[in-house]
Image (cartoon, helix red, strand yellow):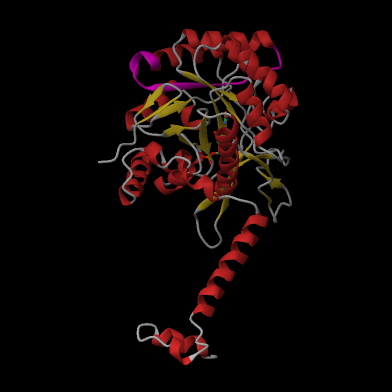
Amino acid sequence: MPTLEINVDGLKLPNPFVIGSGPPGTNGNVIGKAFDEGWGAVICKTISLEADKVTNVQPRYARLRAQGSDEIIGWENIELISDRPFSVWMDELKAVKDKYPERVLIASIMEEFRKDAWAEIVERCEAVGVDAFELNFSCPHGLPERKMGSAMGENPEILHEVAGWVNAVATKPVWAKMTPNVTHIEDPARAAFRAGCEGVSAINTIRSVLGVNLETLRPEPSVEGYTTPGGYSCRAVLPIALRMVMEIAKVVRGEFPGRSISGIGGVETGEDAAQFILLGADTVQVCTGVMKHGYGLIHPLCDGLLKFMDKHKFERIDEFRGHSVQYFTTHFDLVKRQRESREAAKAKHDAKMIRADDQWSGDEFVQQSDALARG
Ligand SMILES: Cc1cc2nc3c(=O)[nH]c(=O)nc-3n(C[C@H](O)[C@H](O)[C@H](O)COP(=O)(O)O)c2cc1C
């Protein structure tokens, strides 16, 4: 019987499925619900020291449906980080750890460009017992106006400096969450690893405009008739997330062996998760999928992943982690491989071509006849 248990950066998870930072980890109650249902770990909604600077708007989501169907395939949000007071968060995280001491609780944190603020948030979270950190360097809306979130993640030098401040004080594993709104994801990933982060998470949402309402001529989500570009998630982003995880996996393999990757973006099935793991992810996060299907999604996710493992006779996740990374190459190399394969096929075909009557053989008679035929 295959097992889904994993050990990542010293953290023991019953399965690789992690609640991604966002509404599904937005208070102690729902975090408890996620553990009760069986999620491998939970990353809380991003918290900061000064929640009074965070003001959300309604509506703050807009959704894209598949043509001719109700199925939601794309989801834009203009939600900020948590607007709940830090002291309340500390009480709730402590209560969660008291109730679920064996389960892995990861604090998603974000602060302004101040060393003392990052040190304070890390130390206070460690004091209530969190098991690891995810540094939100990636929220694409609202926070960049305060030089936070993706304003840091888009700049590898700043990311390196801030991640260094955190790693200087953190005694728990640290993952840096990448923004996809960059040309080369390898650059911020390298900066995080160089700064001592145990892992990176990829991806946060993609900066987007979901659409314009053709009745009102106003873009969505419309807040008093106006909007601001938001973050795109859900199934539509899966191929982009897979590509970025694969690129980071190559960096890990070549330059930072042993560092971890948490894959995120569009996961709704065990088969989606299997693909992230095949491309190098240690854990797989789900955010929008939980908003669509609820916390019970963990059951089909585990069943689907186990079914995949059973089919290929994998007993443990590390038997196939990163397996498919080897099949990525350059387009130049694809052309070369195709030319060589065609030449080999032609040589094989030519070898069957009869040039003298004593070459006819009883066993290959039909193929030899075919080789001499046209049409
Ligand atoms: C409504 C909403 C709120 C989110 N809030 C946060 C957040 O506070 N911190 C964070 O790091 N990521 C946040 N995210 C990003 C998700 O954690 C995740 O990186 C992204 O949505 C892609 O994964 P998914 O397709 O499974 O949702 C949020 C996403 C959504 C949809």
Is residue 111 magenta-colored?
yes
Q: Give the percent coordinates (x, y) of residue 238.
A: 55, 47
The residue segment tinted magenta is 97-114
Check the image and name the residue furthest to the left.
1
- Asked if residue 62 shows in the view, the reply is no
Q: Give the percent coordinates (x, y) of residue 254.
A: 58, 35
Residue 269, compared with residue 355, is above or below; it is above
**Horizontal side, residue 34 vs residue 60: left or right:** left
Quadrant of picture, ligand 1: top right
Residue under the point 46% across and 10% down? 128
Q: How many marks?
A: 0
Give residue 359's quadrant in the image: bottom left
Query: Quadrant where the N terminus lies?
Result: top left
Is residue 158 magenta-colored?
no
Asked whether 94 or 246 is in front, the reply is: 246
**Horizontal side, residue 57 vs residue 226: left or right:** left
Give residue 166's quadrant in the image: top right
Query: Quadrant where the C terminus lies?
Result: bottom right
Residue 79, compared with residue 1, is above or below; it is above
Residue under the point 46% across and 41% down? 277
Residue 228, compared with residue 256, is above or below; it is below
Asked whether 354 or 14 is in front, the reply is: 354
- Asked if residue 6 shows in the view, the reply is yes
Residue 196, compared with residue 344, is above or below; it is above
